[in-house]
Image (cartoon, grey):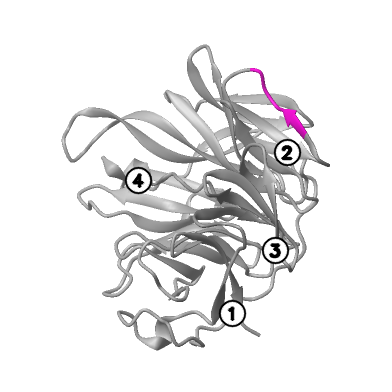
Amino acid sequence: MHRAVFIRVAFALIALTACRADAPVAPSQPGHSDLNPNFPAELFANYTPVELPGAGTGIVADINDGGDAVGVADGAGAIWRGAAHTKGDLPFNPAAIANDGTIAGNLDGHAVMFRNGQLIPLDSASSTATAICRCASETIVGSVVVNGERHAAIWVGGVRIDAGVPPGGTSSEFTGAANGHFVGNADVPTRNLNTGTIEILQQAFSWSHDTGWHNLMAPWDLVSFVTGVNSKGFAVGGEGRVLIPDPIGVAFDTLGIISEYFGDPQLRIRIPDAINDSGTMAGNDDEVSVALLMGLSGGASVLPPGNTGDFATSINSSNVIGGRSGGKPVLWVPNP
């Protein structure tokens, strides 16, 4: 359901129940007079950006199904609650928020959970929380350092499950969890077919208690990453192909790639970053740097106003999208 936002550097070289059914994707019709003129009006999604109060700069990291959002405002952790988006301060850096208001985040090099006003350390070891199961908030995922090696980790009720690394891997991290589905990325020594040398490259994986690690990469990939997963087991991320330098957005099922999002002249590098249960995705174009509304069928619309530097990070069951616009934390809300 939720994405890990800052995975793109790769291309520079146990929940119990599913969430409620999601709404269908909003139509792509413009309703604004301040749209970026570099895109035709029909390319904009029928959304309104809502600037969140109390922040000069920042970004929304995640939004739950009740409309509560967490993120960073002016360099500090923040939460915006309810329809009024009432701002509160958080004494840590939030990564994700569950439907019951539980927040996963990080403080001083350790994964933490914030529940009912109480800040709870998840691990005494060096660790990072990246995502929380939206409908079963006892499940938080991320990574932990074990004997100097970063391992993908799950915390259930505060108890750590160390998933280790995939066979041959040197480092791993979970980036998404939903309804018993876990996805993440690992650094794996790989022969770079472009250069013929062995390099440490990032690869996307799923993981389960019963079968362990499963590589989601296609045979033609050189690198790949996964940023989030929904409760049906569909995940999103990207791939970099042999002999093709630009990343390509992809959607994965539990066995591997099911859809590839090749660009077009206006939105050339479309990468989905978060997916809800209806298959609606929040994404970004890595070339023109605008935030996108995307669908599993491959369509993409620009989230208004289409500022360069806008970035979408998350999406809830009502298709409300969180992220950044004009350097400020925003929610993009579908128009009625």
Kind of residue indicated by mark 2: Thr
The mark nearer the N terminus, 1 or 4, is 1
Q: Which mark is residue 85?
A: 3
Q: CA distance from mark 1 to mark 4?
A: 35 Å
Q: Is residue 99 magenta?
A: no
Where residue 56 appears, as percent x and y from the top left, is: 51, 57
Q: Residue at x 62, y 62 (%)?
A: 53
Tell me if residue 120 is in the magenta stretch. yes
> In the image, what residue type sits under mark 3?
His
Looking at marks 2 and 4 on the same chain, the residue that comes earlier in the sequence is marked by: 2
Q: Mark 3 Cα within 10 Å, few/some/many (few <14, many 20+)?
A: some
Image coordinates of residue 93 in percent, x first then y, are 60, 39
Quadrant location, the C terminus: bottom right
The residue indicated by pointer 1 is 26
Q: CA distance from mark 1 to mark 3?
A: 22 Å
Determine the secondary structure under disc 1: loop
Percent x, y for residue 265? 26, 74
Element marked by disc 2: strand
Q: Which structural element holds mark 4?
A: loop
Up/down of 169 relative to 334, above or below: above
What is the residue that sits farthest to the left in this orientation? 195
Q: CA distance from mark 2 to mark 3?
A: 26 Å
Q: Image point 48% across, 47% down: which residue? A: 226
Q: In front: 139, or 69?
A: 69
* Residue placed most toward the observer, 115 or 13: 115
